[in-house]
Image (cartoon, helix red, strand yellow):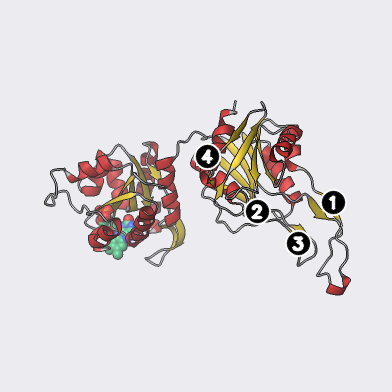
C-alpha cells in the first residue's frame, strides 16, 4: 500500500518512544521506506540499534556525526520525506518547532522539509494543558502542521488525564491519509449504510444474512480519508469502526430506516451498501419459543429504505444490488424504481464478488443508460471508484 513512499520519523525523549517500534514495524509491513532520526533525549529511552533493525535503515542521531555519504544528513532526510512524523512529540520539541529553533537533527529536519509534518504529542497532563504548550500547538496547527491528539488515561507518571500517546493505528491512519488521499470531499456530508440487519423472532433467535459489512466500511474509511464528514449506519459486524467516522449501530431494518431518515436530510451523498432484510417477523414472541411450541413464522415486508430516499432526494443516491441471476434486468429495474443515481451490482456467481470477501467485481448501471464493468479489485479500491463517480455528480 505504501510502496515507494518514505516516512521520516523524528523520535523525541518521552516514555512513549518504545511505541515507535510498533509504528515502524506496521509502516514496513505496509511497504513504506522508514527513516528515523532521534534527539539525544530519545536515545536515553530506546537505542538507535532497535530502530535501525526495525527500519532496515541507518538511524540519524546527531547533525555533527561522522558522515556515511557526502549528503548532509538532515537535508537528505528532509528531501527524502513524503511525510514526516514526530512521535512521541515532547513539550520541548513542540515549543522548539513553534519558535523556529533548529538545534538538533529532528528540529533541523522539520525546518528543512517541504513534506507534511504530523505531530503526535505525549506528555504529562499538566505539561499538555500548560497554556504555553496549548498556544504552541494552536500556532503550529495554523501553520498547517497536523496533530494526532493524545488520549486520556493513566499516564506513565501515574497521573490520570490527557497526554497519553494516541493509538498507534490512529497515527498510522493519519500517515496513510496524507500519503495516499486528496481531500476532495472536504466539507461534504456522506451517509453510508453497511452490514446485515437482524429481524427478531424471539429473545434468542433472529433472521439475518451473510453481509460482512466490508464494502460499506471500506466506503466509510475512504470517504473519511478524503475529508468527508461520514456517518455510518451499521448492522452487527466484526469490523473495527473506521477512524473519524460517526458510527451508529442498529439491528432491524426498521431501526436502520429510522436512522437513515434522521440523518439523510443534511447529506451530499448517500450510499446504501447494507444488506437490508426484506421481511420482519410479524408474530415475534416474548422469551424463548419452546421446541414443542414452534409455530409458523409470519413475515411482513420491511420499509424500502432506498425507495423512500429516492422519492425526495437532494443528494447523490447510490444503491447496491446483489443477484444470482438476471443481474442487468433486476439492477436496471431497481435503478429506475428507486430513483438512484447509479446502482453498483454484484453478481454472486462471480468468484471474488459479494459477501465476506476482501475483493469485489461489479457492474455499474447509470441513470443515462450507460453501464461500466469494473475488473476484480479490493473493496477499498472499489470504494474509491464509487466515491469518484458520486463526487462527479455533486453540484
Ligand atoms: C523518565 C522521563 C520521561 C519523560 N517523558 C516525557 C514525555 O512523555 N513527554 C515530554 O514532553 N517530556 C518527557 N520527559 C522530559 C523530556 O525528556 C525533556 O523535556 C527533554 O529535554 C526532551 O528532549 P527532546 O524534546 O529533545 O527529545 C521525560 C523525562 C524523563 C526523565
> Left or right of 83: which side holds 313?
right
Q: Secondary structure at mark 2?
A: loop
Q: Residues within 10 Å of mark 1 (few under 14, many from 20)?
A: few
Q: Does the residue tagged 4 have its C-beta within 8 Å of any atom of ligand 1?
A: no
Residue 374, horizontal then vertical, whole percent? 56, 38
Marked residue nearer the N-terminal end (2 or 4): 2
Residue 179, horizontal then vertical, whole percent? 39, 42
The residue indicated by pointer 1 is 300
User: Which of the 4 quarters of the picture holds residue 163?
Assistant: bottom left
Q: Secondary structure at mark 1?
A: strand
Residue situated in front as seen by the camera: 216 or 191? 216
Q: Residues within 10 Å of mark 2 (few under 14, many from 20)?
A: many
Residue 59, horizontal then vertical, whole percent? 23, 54
Q: Is residue 102 visible?
A: no
The residue indicated by pointer 2 is 211
Tell me the distance, in whole angstroms, between the alpha carbons under discs 2 and 3: 15 Å
Residue situated in front as seen by the camera: 356 or 251? 356
Q: Residue furthest left?
A: 66
> Left or right of 102: which side holds 1?
right
Tell me the distance, in whole angstroms, between the alpha carbons under discs 1 and 4: 36 Å
Identity of the residue drawn at 36% across and 58% down: 25
The residue indicated by pointer 3 is 206
Marked residue nearer the N-terminal end (2 or 3): 3
Q: Does the residue tagged 3 have its C-beta within 8 Å of any atom of ligand 1?
A: no
Cβ–Cβ below 8 Å for labels 1 and 2? no
The residue indicated by pointer 4 is 384
User: Mark 2 or mark 3: which is in front?
Assistant: 2
User: Which of the 4 quarters of the picture holds residue 151?
Assistant: bottom left
Marked residue nearer the N-terminal end (3 or 4): 3
Tell me the distance, in whole angstroms, between the alpha carbons under discs 1 and 2: 21 Å
Identity of the residue drawn at 65% across and 52% down: 195
Marked residue nearer the N-terminal end (1 or 4): 1
Amino acid at each position: 500500500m505504501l510502496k515507494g513512499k518514505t516516512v521520516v520519523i523524528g523520535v523525541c525523549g518521552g516514555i512513549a518512544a518504545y511505541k515507535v517500534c510498533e509504528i515502524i514495524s506496521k509502516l514496513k509491513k505496509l511497504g513504506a521506506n522508514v527513516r528515523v532520526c532521534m534527539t539525544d533525549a530519545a536515545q536515553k529511552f530506546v537505542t538507535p540499534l532497535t530502530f535501525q533493525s526495525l527500519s532496515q535503515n541507518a538511524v540519524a542521531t546527531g547533525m555533527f556525526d561522522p558522515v556515511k555519504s557526502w549528503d548532509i544528513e538532515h537535508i537528505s532526510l528532509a528531501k527524502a520525506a513524503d511525510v514526516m512524523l514526530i512521535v512521541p512529540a515532547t513539550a520541548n520539541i513542540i515549543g522548539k518547532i513553534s519558535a523556529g529553533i533548529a538545534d538538533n537533527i529532528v528540529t533541523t529536519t522539520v525546518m528543512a522539509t517541504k513534506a507534511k509534518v504530523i505531530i503526535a504529542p505525549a506528555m504529562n497532563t499538566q505539561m499538555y494543558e500548560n497554556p504555553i504548550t496549548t498556544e504552541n500547538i494552536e500556532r503550529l496547527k495554523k501553520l498547517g502542521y497536523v496533530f494526532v491528539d493524545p488520549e486520556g488515561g493513566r499516564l506513565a507518571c501515574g497521573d490520570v488525564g490527557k497526554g497519553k500517546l494516541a493509538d498507534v493505528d490512529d497515527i498510522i491512519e493519519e500517515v496513510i491519509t496524507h500519503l495516499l488521499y486528496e481531500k476532495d470531499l472536504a466539507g461534504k456530508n456522506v451517509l453510508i449504510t453497511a452490514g446485515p440487519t437482524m429481524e427478531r423472532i424471539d429473545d434468542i433467535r433472529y433472521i439475518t444474512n451473510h453481509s460482512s459489512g466490508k464494502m460499506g466500511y471500506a466506503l466509510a474509511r475512504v470517504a473519511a480519508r478524503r475529508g468527508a464528514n461520514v456517518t455510518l449506519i451499521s448492522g452487527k459486524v466484526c469490523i473495527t469502526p473506521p477512524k473519524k467516522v460517526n458510527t451508529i449501530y442498529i439491528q432491524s431494518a426498521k431501526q436502520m430506516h429510522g436512522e437513515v431518515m434522521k440523518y439523510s436530510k443534511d447529506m451530499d451523498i448517500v450510499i446504501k451498501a447494507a444488506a437490508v432484510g426484506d421481511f420482519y417477523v410479524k408474530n415475534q414472541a416474548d422469551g424463548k419459543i419452546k421446541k414443542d411450541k414452534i409455530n409458523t413464522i409470519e413475515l411482513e415486508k420491511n420499509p424500502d429504505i432506498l425507495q423512500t430516499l429516492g422519492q425526495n432526494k437532494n443528494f447523490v443516491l447510490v444503491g447496491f444490488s446483489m443477484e444470482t441471476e438476471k443481474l442487468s434486468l433486476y439492477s436496471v429495474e431497481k435503478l429506475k424504481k428507486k430513483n438512484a443515481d447509479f446502482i453498483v451490482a454484484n453478481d454472486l456467481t462471480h468468484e471474488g464478488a459479494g459477501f465476506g470477501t476482501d475483493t469485489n467485481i461489479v457492474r455499474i448501471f447509470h441513470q443515462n443508460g450507460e453501464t461500466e464493468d469494473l475488473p476484480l479489485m479490493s473493496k477499498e479500491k472499489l470504494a474509491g471508484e464509487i466515491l469518484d463517480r458520486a463526487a462527479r455528480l455533486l453540484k
